[in-house]
Image: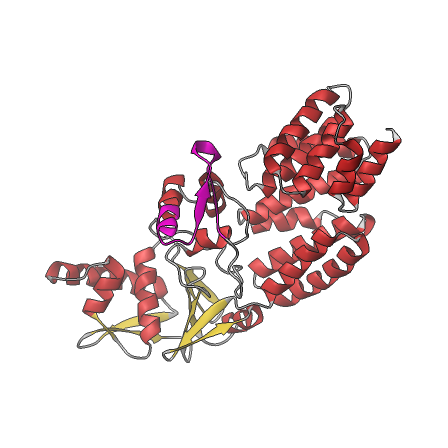
Amino acid sequence: MDSLINAAARALAAGDPLGALNRVALREDAPALALRGIAMAQLGDLVRAKVLVRRAARAFGPKEPVARARCIVAEAEIALASRDLGWPVQALDAARITLADHGDGVNAAHARYLQIRRLLLIGRLDEAQALLADLDPAILPPALRATHELLLAGIAMRCLQSPVARAALSRAELAARQSGIAALCAEVDSAALMLNSPAARLICHGEARPLLLDEVQALLTSTSLVVDGCRYSVRGAGMSVSLASRPILFTLVRTLAQAWPADVSRETLIAKAFRLKLSDESHRARLRVEIGRLRAALKPLASVTASKRGFALVAQVSTDVALLMPPVEARHAAVFALLCDGESWSSSALALALGNSQRSVQRALDTLATAGKVQSFGHGRARRWITPPVPGFATTLLLPGPLSGG
């Protein structure tokens, strides 16, 4: 490589894309195209970045496998930044193997971190954690060490392990400062802000108050029966019952928990669970069937008893009942939470991340757009959805939750 290419590469590594462009902006050779593409990605022009990186990969040709592999890794990073989660991961893994075989351990590790970031976005935490455990950050440069710790913190937050997350963020902050990259330092600060922002609302005895992630973790390990509206489950005494695939049952137990220890009228339960303003005897019969299913699902954590006017929730293994809800009430909270990262998402990427059908996600987006909470740009397959990040709350607990209904 010539001196300008080397200088541009050093500028990019230091987080100075404008300095890199000043050196190679007018050049059309393969190394310059690749560097220009990475610089445009750092500046936020992801469409132009993708075009430049692909041109560079073609220009390098099959006789330069390492350079082509680096371009594939760069294109994967651009796809991840633009939330194109359907980008072929097999190509990224093949590029990682090529880099490792040719002694480029740093870029091979970078490719692995991109794979882990994608797994984290789509909620496959066990796979992400397994891949992360295979990497040794001690032998990597500061920027990648910071990335490693950020991913570790992200997994810990999603798993409600706040002490692990705090320790990882402390190490990430140190590594980011050593790297001298301002954008990386800002990413660490943003993660720390999320960890110290309200992650949920606790509703107990008719009163609501915000909870930090540490407090959520403490609540879930307490003696209370917790109806978890962030993950659609009921927890208590070390046991957990998932109702994520049974939205009617979860609506019923949520309504009963919110009123606990009082009962809830049959009319209210029918209105909440079946979304009906008026009810008749057939709806009451349907309610009795669903209450029976709820009793069976909650054994031995809780039971549901009948009263003169309706039904009441009774904790079997706990002293009290607490309702845990997202920090911001929204019908399509899971979609909204993903959009709150400030990046632009396609409906197909949202569907992949949430494990739901694209049509259900599209209906949720249309509802949120009608309410003025999200907006779109582009048309057809190029259409993307975005919303400004909402300050003051963390989306950590919203992300694993599947869509209910759609």
Say left or right for 384 vs 58: left
Q: Is residue 77 above or below residue 181?
A: above
Q: Quadrant of residue 319?
A: bottom left
Check the image and report above or below for 165 versus 125: below
Q: Position of residue 308 (x, y in %)?
A: 17, 77
- Whether residue 29 is in magenta: the answer is no
Looking at the figure, which quarter contains the N terminus?
A: top right
Q: Is residue 370 rendered magenta in the image?
A: yes
Measured from the top left, where is residue 353 in percent x and y? 50, 45
Closer to us: 399 or 238: 399
On the rendered structure, is 116 left or right of 250? right
Q: What colouring style does the render use?
A: secondary structure
Q: Identify the residue shown where x is 76% and y is 50%.
A: 143
Residue 239 versus residue 284: which sits nearer the camera? Answer: 284
Camera sees residue 316: yes
Is 276 on the left-hand or right-hand side of 85?
Answer: left
Please name the residue shown 73% across and 31% down the image. Answer: 34
Q: Residue at x 37, y 57 (%)?
A: 331
What is the total number of numbered labels drawn onto the structure image? 0
Does any portion of residue 321 appear in the rendered image? no
Residue that lies at the very extreme toward the left in this rendered image:
281
Residue 342: x %, y % from top left:
54, 51
Residue at the extreme right of the image, as rendered: 3
Quarter of the figure with residue 299: bottom left
Residue 322 vs residue 304, the one in the foreground: 322
Q: Which residues are magenta?
A: 365-387
The answer to whether residue 337 is above or below residue 199 is above
In percent of width and height, residue 86 lies at 53, 36
Work out whether 375 lies above or below 9: below
Q: Quadrant of residue 276?
A: bottom left
Q: Residue at x 56, y 58 (%)?
A: 158
